[in-house]
Amino acid sequence: MKALETIVDTTETRFITLELPQEIKPGKHKLVIVVYEDFSEDTDDLSKEALSPEINQAYKDELDIRLARMETEPHAGYTWEESIQMLEKRFGKKIKA
């Protein structure tokens, strides 16, 4: 998984064109798009606009470890009820859901 950050233009028909780096090989990829609605075009160089905060290397490394573990050991997740039970057990009190 790679985190890429870029700026795209959206057409009236809601299509976008995105140029990916050469390291991204042709094929099927999962893409997550975050629409930053408060983006400002007040600057001449849009690439200087900070789209996300900087994350230190240790945090990035930890995210990579967790992602790799998730990909090799997938888990279906928990139901709402199971989540509430785990939280109640952890904090020792009833939770109103």
Image (cartoon, rainbow, N blue to C red):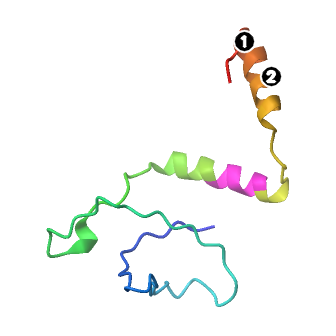
Disc 2 secondary structure class = helix
Residue 42 x, y percent position in the rendering: 14, 68
Q: Which residue matches tag 1? A: 94
Report the span colored magenta.
Answer: 64-70
Tell me what residue is drawn at x 35 percent, y 81 percent.
9
Report crowding for label 1: few under 14, some 14 to 19, many 20 or more residues within 10 A (C-alpha).
few
Q: Which residue matches tag 2? A: 85
- Picture quarter with the C terminus: top right
Tell me what residue is drawn at x 80 percent, y 45 percent.
77
Among numbered discs 1 and 2, the one appearing first in the sequence = 2
Report crowding for label 2: few under 14, some 14 to 19, many 20 or more residues within 10 A (C-alpha).
some
Farthest residue in the top direction?
A: 92
Q: CA distance from mark 1 to mark 2?
A: 9 Å
Horizontal side, residue 70 vs residue 14: left or right = right
Tell me what residue is drawn at x 66 percent, y 78 percent.
29
> Which quarter of the picture shows residue 47?
bottom left
Residue 87 x, y percent position in the rendering: 73, 22
Magenta region, mostly helix, strand or loop? helix
Residue 69 colored in magenta in the image: yes
The kind of residue tagged 2 is Gln
Disc 1 secondary structure class = loop
Tell me what residue is drawn at x 75 percent, y 25 percent.
84
Horizontal side, residue 53 vs residue 47: left or right = right
Residue 71 x, y percent position in the rendering: 78, 59
Which of 70 and 7 lies nearest the eye of the viewer? Answer: 7
The kind of residue tagged 1 is Lys
Q: Is residue 63 above or below residue 94?
A: below
